[in-house]
Amino acid sequence: MKNTVATILEQKKRKDKITMLTAYDYSTAKLMDEAGVNSVLVGDSLGMVMLGYEDTLSVTMEDMIHHTAAVARGCKNALIVADMPFMSYQTSVYDAVCNAGRLMKEGRAQAVKLEGGEKICLQIKAIVESSIPVVAHIGLTPQSVNAFGGYKVQGKDEETARQLVKDAKAVEEAGAFAVVLECVPDKLAGLITESIHIPTIGIGAGAGCDGQVLVYQDMLSMYSTFKPKFVKCFANVGEMMTAAFKQYIEETKAGIFPGEVHGFRMADEIIEKLY
Ligand code: KIV
Ligand code: NA
């Protein structure tokens, strides 16, 4: 079944949990799509997990378009959401619409995601008015790591909790069709989920959200640089990769690989003539 903005909205009403995973390349996106994930997010987390930067701030529009186009070629049914990178929408409403348009036109995304609540509602409204579906992202917004002073859980005290509820209502009002809640206490995420009509997609926000999202290198234990508390390891792919790489090195050095089955044959009389 093809996932669309309409089917994702419908899932909230039916209480059918929305599943989202990040992907950054064709092969991985294709595996996820075939597994039946509702949505694939080309996250700007690619700066960290794919490109090895310390945070997401260095990610460019060119990076996002390049990876989104690869993911789009691998997906038949999953809804493709692309992150708007740092400084591609904060600077002005005009920049926001142009850059969202590039992710759709050049990257073939089907929706874009922006970090921020009330502060970026003018951008959300203008992008939605350009017929581009928007996912908002509130709570721990990694592009604000320098303003936050680190990656910290958001909304623990009354004032910031109230602000997050306001932000969620504001992005719904501005036209976002879903909102990611990152690192928000479970109960606050549950309250927000009940307070708005659009689906909440949680990461470190508990089971009360309408859906979940994870970075695939996190859920497969492939990214050892940093492991957040909210991550569950669904398969130890990092260890499997290391074991396979080591086995390849050993077998190649020992002459076990390549075996006869991996090679090509030719007629003996031809090779004899060459000796
Ligand atoms: O960039 C990303 O991977 C994200 C998800 C963690 C929501 O924004
Ligand atoms: Na992101």
Image: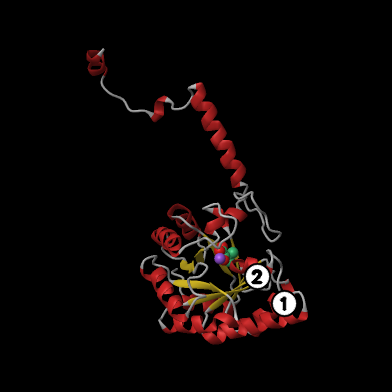
Local secondary structure at mark 1: helix
Residue with the mark numbered 1:
188
Of the two numbered discs 2 and 1 in the rendering, the one whose residue sits closer to the viewer: 2
Residue 116: which disc?
none
User: What is the CA distance from the residue labelled 2 to the residue labelled 1?
Assistant: 22 Å
- What residue occupies the far bottom of the structure in this picture? 173
261 displayed left or right of 232: left
- Assign the N terminus to one quadrant of the image: bottom left
Q: Residue at x 63, y 82 (%)?
A: 167
Check disc 1 and give the amino acid type: Leu
Q: How many marks?
A: 2
Question: Label 2 sits on what residue type?
Answer: Ala
Residue hosting label 2: 147
Q: Position of residue 107 (x, y in %)?
A: 39, 65
Model colouring: secondary structure
Please state which of residues 180 and 164 is positioned toward the viewer in this rendering: 164
Q: Residue at x 51, y 84 (%)?
A: 122
Where does residue 199 sit, x and y in percent of width and height? 58, 77
Measuring 74% from the left and 75% from the top, which residue is drawn there? 187
